[in-house]
């Protein structure tokens, strides 16, 4: 049982996710993550960044949450793949809206906070047209919905089985990359967001407007997305920006409001039990998941509203 320090809350975890961040920390990919997670073996004995559950205890000076509150959040330092996790009360944690289930809430932060960081880093407004590549994953599906909540025109790129899903999520136009090369599109965009890190600025430059921006959720070949922002910063053509994650409680509360209103609903793919954690990691690492992979830890007896049509495999 974790010790609850001053300013923390103890959460009984009902559900979580297995995501790319968890896999990266476990496998130490890219390699330099070892400097943070351990050179020879992982320092963290319990992984898990996303959680949804019930507050069971509060530390001294905590006034924003009470015992019995249904909460969800994100903890970069891990620890959520367990029955209990202690998290800072001022961290990335918020109450779950009454009409949102534990499983949906559990998937509401990891992909969404990366997507929100893109939206803010690109200074996107409703006058813009944005292309999202890898739009059926956790980050991409969140990006499409968050962009639409801001009134942005969105073109989504995915494979054939997910075309209808992206239309359901609100994309104005969907490109099936199995039949069409999106980098040869006749349209040009104010921003291109690669949510899976499988394209490059060089390939996408031709579909960007003269003042357009390229952003990726990945470092890219030879970590080019870290130094290209410096090289292209003062150029007269398209530029590169890297969307460093925004992590604060204000964002999580905003996501809770969007889930409550229905403007944002995390897409759920498969559900695994905690005893199936190895299989869950293996599936996520195939790169074939749709939206989010849920980890059931203890949902028995939890308040579970009816699933929405956008939940797949829930």
Image (cartoon, helix red, strand yellow):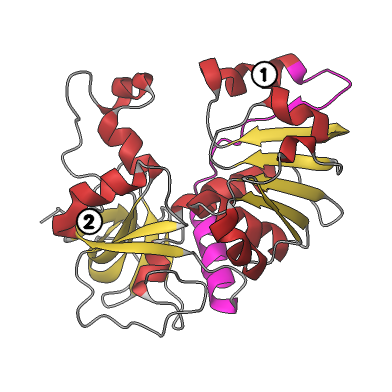
**Disc 2 residue crowd, few under 14, some 14–19, many 20+, Cα 10 Å:** many
Secondary structure found at label 1: helix
Secondary structure found at label 2: strand
Q: Which residue occupies the foreground of this view, 177 or 79?
A: 177
**Percent x, y of residue 17:** 33, 56
- Would you say 43 lies left or right of 123 here? left
User: From where the camera sits, is residue 4 visible?
Assistant: no
Q: Is residue 270 one of those drawn in magenta?
A: no
**Mark 2, residue position:** 85
Residue name at image x 86 percent, y 23 percent: 237
**Percent x, y of residue 131:** 72, 46
Residue name at image x 77 percent, y 28 percent: 205
Is the C-beta separation of discs 2 and 1 under 8 Å? no
CA distance separating discs 2 and 1:
39 Å
Q: Quadrant of the C terminus?
A: bottom left
Instruction: Give the magenta range.
Output: 232-261
**Disc 1 residue crowd, few under 14, some 14–19, many 20+, Cα 10 Å:** some
- Would you say 206 lies left or right of 55 here? right
Quarter of the figure with residue 68: bottom left
Q: Which residue occupies the foreground of this view, 97 or 126?
A: 126
72 up-or-down from 138: above or below: below
**Mark 1, residue position:** 228
**Percent x, y of residue 281:** 27, 45
Residue name at image x 85 percent, y 41 percent: 188
């Amino acid at each position: 049982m974790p010790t609850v320090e001053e300013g923390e809350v103890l959460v009984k975890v009902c559900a979580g996710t297995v995501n790319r961040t968890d896999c990266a920390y476990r496998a130490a990919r890219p390699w330099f993550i070892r400097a943070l997670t351990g050179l020879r073996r992982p320092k963290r004995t319990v992984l898990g960044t996303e959680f949804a559950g019930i507050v069971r205890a509060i530390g001294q000076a905590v006034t924003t949450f009470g015992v019995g509150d249904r909460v969800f959040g994100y903890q970069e330092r891990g620890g959520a793949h367990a029955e209990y996790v202690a998290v800072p009360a001022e961290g990335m944690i918020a109450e779950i809206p009454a009409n949102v289930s534990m499983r949906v809430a559990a998937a509401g932060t990891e992909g969404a906070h990366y997507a929100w960081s893109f939206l803010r880093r690109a200074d996107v407004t409703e006058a813009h047209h944005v292309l999202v590549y890898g739009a059926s994953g956790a980050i991409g599906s969140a990006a499409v919905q968050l962009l639409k909540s801001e009134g942005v025109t969105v073109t989504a790129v995915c494979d054939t089985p997910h075309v209808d899903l992206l239309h359901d999520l609100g994309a104005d136009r969907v490109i099936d990359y199995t039949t069409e090369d999106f980098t040869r599109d006749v349209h040009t965009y104010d921003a291109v967001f690669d949510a899976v890190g499988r394209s490059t600025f060089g390939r996408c430059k031709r579909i960007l407007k003269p003042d357009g921006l390229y952003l990726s959720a990945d470092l890219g070949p030879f970590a080019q997305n870290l130094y290209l922002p410096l090289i292209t910063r003062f150029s007269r053509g398209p530029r590169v920006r890297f969307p460093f994650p925004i992590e604060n409680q204000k964002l999580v509360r905003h996501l809770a409001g969007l889930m409550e209103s229905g403007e944002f609903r995390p897409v759920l793919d498969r559900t695994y039990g905690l005893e199936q954690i190895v299989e869950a990691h293996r599936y996520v690492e195939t790169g074939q998941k749709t939206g989010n992979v849920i980890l059931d830890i203890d949902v028995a007896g939890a308040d579970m509203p009816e699933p929405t049509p956008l939940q797949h495999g829930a």
